[in-house]
Amino acid sequence: QVQLVESGGGLVQAGGSLRLSCAASGRTFSSYDMGWFRQAPGKEREFVAAISWSGGSTYYLDSVKVRFTISRDNAKNTVYLQMNSLKPEDTAVYYCAAKPVAAKGYDYWGQGTQVTVSS
């Protein structure tokens, strides 16, 4: 079982930056691939970024690929999402999620953190 707690959301002007953190409980954090997802009002939840258990592979939604960076620190049981050049369309609740390496889907989710980008 993994418990995930996101932090770092807030209100920022367009062009600004935020860094989201997701702290995981448990001693097996390095056994999980980690992802960030977001859900804007009235829209479906969408994938934003993912990182493999070792940090060696990363994946991004095309629209954030140049602006966002996912990283992890297995010693601190934490995954990060650095978000630069934020746009109003990035406004959403951001969720982190954990997927056991051998699994097909994400089994564990955090409660979400709100990111609001003003124009």
Image (cartoon, rainbow, N blue to C red):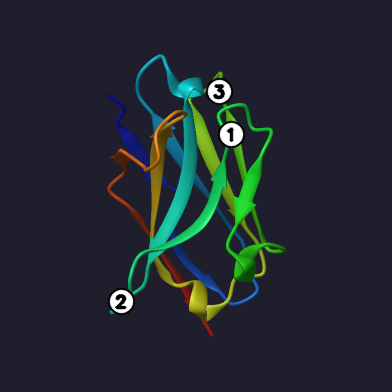
Residue 8 in view of the camera: no
Residue at figure coordinates x 31%, y 27% from the top left: 2
Say what amino acid the circle numbered 1 marks: Arg
Say what amino acid the circle numbered 3 marks: Asn
Contact between labelled residues 3 and 1, with CB atoms less than 8 Å apart: yes
Q: Residue furthest bottom?
A: 119
Say what amino acid the circle numbered 2 marks: Pro
Residue at figure coordinates x 46%, y 59% from the top left: 47
The residues tagged by marks 2 and 3 sit, at their Cα atoms, a distance apart of: 32 Å
Residue at figure coordinates x 62%, y 51% from the top left: 59
Q: Residues within 10 Å of mark 1 (few under 14, many from 20)?
A: many
Q: Tell me which numbered mark, 1 or 2, is placed earlier along the sequence.
A: 2
Contact between labelled residues 2 and 1, with CB atoms less than 8 Å apart: no
Q: Left or right: where does residue 109 sit relative to residue 89?
A: left
- What percent of the width, then of the height, locates residue 62? 63, 67
State the count of labels: 3
Q: Nearer the viewer, residue 118 or 105?
A: 105
Q: Residues within 10 Å of mark 2 (few under 14, many from 20)?
A: few
Q: Residues within 10 Å of mark 3 (few under 14, many from 20)?
A: some
- What percent of the width, then of the height, locates residue 57? 66, 39
Q: Check the picture and name the quadrant holding the N terminus.
A: top left
Q: Mark 3 highlights which residue?
A: 74
The residues tagged by marks 1 and 3 sit, at their Cα atoms, a distance apart of: 6 Å
Q: Nearer the viewer, residue 7 or 103?
A: 103
> Residue 72 bears which disc, if any?
1
Assign a secondary structure to mark 2.
Answer: loop
Q: Check the picture and name the quadrant holding the C terminus.
A: bottom right
Q: Left or right: where does residue 68 sit relative to residue 32?
A: right
Residue at figure coordinates x 48%, y 45% from the top left: 35
Assign a secondary structure to mark 3.
Answer: loop
> Residue 101 bears which disc, if any?
none
> Residue 41 bears which disc, if any?
2
